[in-house]
Amino acid sequence: MRQLTLEQLSENLQDYVQSAQQEQILITQNGKPIALLMGLENFDPEQWNLQFSPDFWQMISKRRQRPTIPFSLVEAELENLGDD
């Protein structure tokens, strides 16, 4: 991840926007992070909408709190389905 100051970004914004298509760029001001520049060229609209959706991430968080089933049990159940 590249790191730039806000001043550096403003000097060559177009070049950095192009660079952000390949790597994330952390923008700092007075030595502290203030923004992250990342390209969306290879994302489809649904993908980047979900990535920044608080509702989506809240749903994911709730799902992750549910009990899980070991993969070996899932495999065993699938094998049993094939025996019928």
Image (cartoon, rainbow, N blue to C red):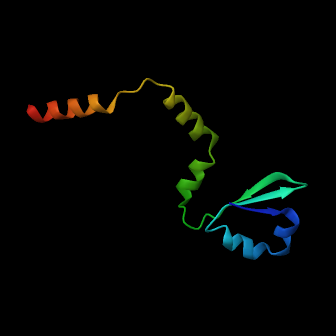
Q: Quadrant of the N terminus?
A: bottom right
Q: Nearer the viewer, residue 73 or 53?
A: 73
Residue positioned most to the top: 67
On the image, the x and y values in percent for residue 78 come to: 20, 34
Instruction: Classify residue 54 as left or right of residue 73.
Output: right
Residue positioned most to the left: 84
Q: Number of numbered discs present?
A: 0
Rendering quarter of residue 75: top left
Q: Residue at x 49, y 31 (%)?
A: 63
Q: Which of 5 and 58 is in front in this view?
A: 5
On the image, the x and y values in percent for residue 57 come to: 58, 39
> Is 12 located above or below residue 20 in the figure?
below
> Is 81 located above or below residue 12 in the figure?
above
Q: In which quarter of the image is the C terminus?
A: top left
Q: Which residue is drawn at 63% across and 48% down?
A: 52
On the image, the x and y values in percent for residue 53 come to: 62, 45
> Is 83 located above or below residue 28 in the figure?
above
Instruction: Classify residue 3 as left or right of residue 60.
Output: right
On the image, the x and y values in percent for residue 27 come to: 79, 59
Instruction: Classify residue 18 as left or right of residue 84.
Output: right
Q: Residue at x 84, y 62 (%)?
A: 5
Q: Residue at x 59, y 52 (%)?
A: 49
